[in-house]
Amino acid sequence: MTNNEYPEEILQSLEDYNIDIRDFLPGHGSGAKLLLDFNKISGVEQVEGIILKGREIDNGIVADIIIKEGTHHEEPIHLCFGVNKESGIQEIFPRIIAEDNTDVKIQAHCSFPNANGLIHKMYGHFYIGKNCNFTYSETHYHGEKSGALVAPVAIIYVGENSTFENNFNLTKGTPGKVKIMIDIYAMRNSTIRSNIRAFGKNKKDSIRVRDSIFLEGENAKSLIKMKAAARDGGEVLMYGITEGNAPHCNGHVECNEIVLGKGSICRARPFIRATDPTSSVSHEASLGRFPQKWLDELQAKGLTEQEATDILIEAMLRE
Amino acid sequence: MLLELENVTIPTFDKQRIIVNNVSFGVKEGSIHSIIGPNGSGKSTLAYTIMGLTNYKLKSGKIKFEDKDITDKTITERAQLGITLAWQEPARIEGLSVAKYISLGVKEKSRIKEKVKDVLQTVNLEPEKYVDRFIDDSLSGGERKRIELAAAIAMQPRLIILDEPDSGLDVIITEDFWNIFNKIKELNMTILLITHREDIGMVADYGTLLWRGEHLITDEFPKVMLQYCKKAGLKEFCKRALFKNGVKCFDDDYIDKIFEGVDLND
């Protein structure tokens, strides 16, 4: 596939994240790939050990990804869900199975640069086998009109002795309405890290994230880190949920949110629950403005308060 | 004088108590000027007030920079005039790359990579090892201090206020910091050095002694240090420690006289 077969606007849309989607297109790099142009599959590339199949349905696709036992790949599997149109519905049904002893990363780019009435939904099911190392990273750009409604749901099972890392990043552009629900079930000796970063920039931006981890296996460990900022009327609500339901499991929820400008709202609702007497679950949250001494440190370098605040947000939301 | 303080009085945040009382002194352009005094004497408060930090306001007095009254200027305005401060707890903004942090205050962004490398070398850090790193827990306190100094130098300010640059560092690093201070001086920057360590302070040309918020003396640094030792009752220390460029600053007999109460100017 050549670059000019995929909308240029989408290819360029993640530049602010320092991501060039061209680097991930079929024919570039050695990773498996699936590209979607609205609801049409415009490119698929498979590599040894990874089965990647897409099937078009009425408003989107079903994507099956199977990582065969023992497969290790440095190069990430690239999923690009791009929509160049202003409006419409895009529904993605990914079904992902990582068989035992695999080590892979999935990098998903969801880019809707012209969104103005666009609906993007995802219903993902992940099964991660035993002794796996699996990273799923999703970077979003919803244009500058706050015109997207984005609602991904993911249910993820992480097998024994496996490590699963989830990264969700929506810090550039204007998000619009975003509702994210993630449920992760962690089995014996598994380790889960979930990093959520989001930035609402005006009163049309509303971001709600419910990130839940259920520690169901002995010695399972987890860490949820949620970082968000709301500016000029933007609204962010973060639910960080962890349940300790097995012996010696250990989980922590951390949430930091910054509120800037009148009418902006940040809310954090850590919810922790322990049902096993040997489990340990904790949380911490901070909301409000940046500490004055951080602003002073940057202003002593000649930055205005606004510039200093922008730098602090950039640092806080760094992927 | 590059910087002049005229009858500066600084209250606590709640304005119930005075931290620095009626202090006046000047800092000569191109010099290293050290403010010394025991803990709690108001040194850092004075430094933050000169920088114009948000919560540090004068009750009375004036601060002049290059003969202009800057008392009412904000921290940003003072920085843009050429004053900056390297902090006692430096480089706290985690998540920025070292290169980005250093370049924040650089006005002219052309050749920025070279400028960042140059200042890292000035503070004795190997540029290749640091430019791509991020400010995070992997950096030691000493590395952060040097990066903070590099960021201050990169601004090319007229006046750098160094707040306790020695705190948390091993004594063995002292000489290295002396060298860095002299390099900064060679770059035509004036240093206002806040310290309570005489070995760091001995690099200074001039000094000011603060004692419980009061200004006791401003003079050549060894003379200020002698007064400090007298005030603290440290005669033997004074005889043992007051050396400048390897040469003893005062004869033991002279120190004895000073401690017996003879006026320094006699």
Image (cartoon, coloured by chain):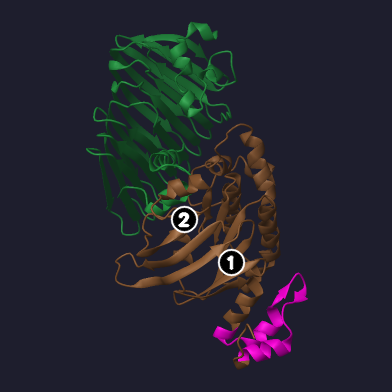
Chain colours: A green, B brown
Identify residue type, mark 1: Ser
The amino acid pointed to by label 2 is Met
Which residue occupies the extreme bottom position in the image?
Answer: B260
User: Is the N terminus of chain A in the top left, top right, bottom left or bottom right quadrant?
Assistant: top right
Determine the chain carrying the residue at label 1.
Answer: B
| SS of the residue under disc 2 | helix
Q: Residue A258's image quarter?
A: top left
Measured from the top left, where is residue A158 in percent x and y?
A: 41, 38
With respect to residue A102, does A270 lie above or below?
A: below
Query: Can residue A245 be seen?
Result: no
Task: Give the quadrant of residue B212.
Answer: bottom left
Q: Position of residue A143 (x, y in %)?
A: 36, 21
Residue indicated by mark 2: B51
Q: Identify the magenta region.
A: B230-259
Is residue B255 one of those drawn in magenta? yes
x and y, in percent, of residue A203 in the image: 24, 30
Q: Chain of mark 2?
A: B
Q: Nearer the viewer, residue B31 or B228?
A: B31
Q: Which residue is mark 1?
A: B34
Q: Residue A150 at what x, y percent from top left?
A: 30, 24
Judging depth in this view, the residue of A177 and A182 nearest the camera is: A177
Circle 1 packing at 10 Å, graded few (<14), some (14-19), many (20+), is many
Residue B17 appears left or right of A53: left
Residue A147 in the magenta stretch? The answer is no
- Residue at point 64% right, 56% down? B30
Please tell me the numbered disc located at residue A2. Answer: none
View extreme (top): residue: A5
Depth order, front residue of B219/A169: B219
Relative side of A187 to A201, left or right = right
Is label 1 in a helix, a strand or a loop? Answer: strand
B248 to B26, vertically: above or below: below
Q: Is residue A174 above or below residue B79?
A: above
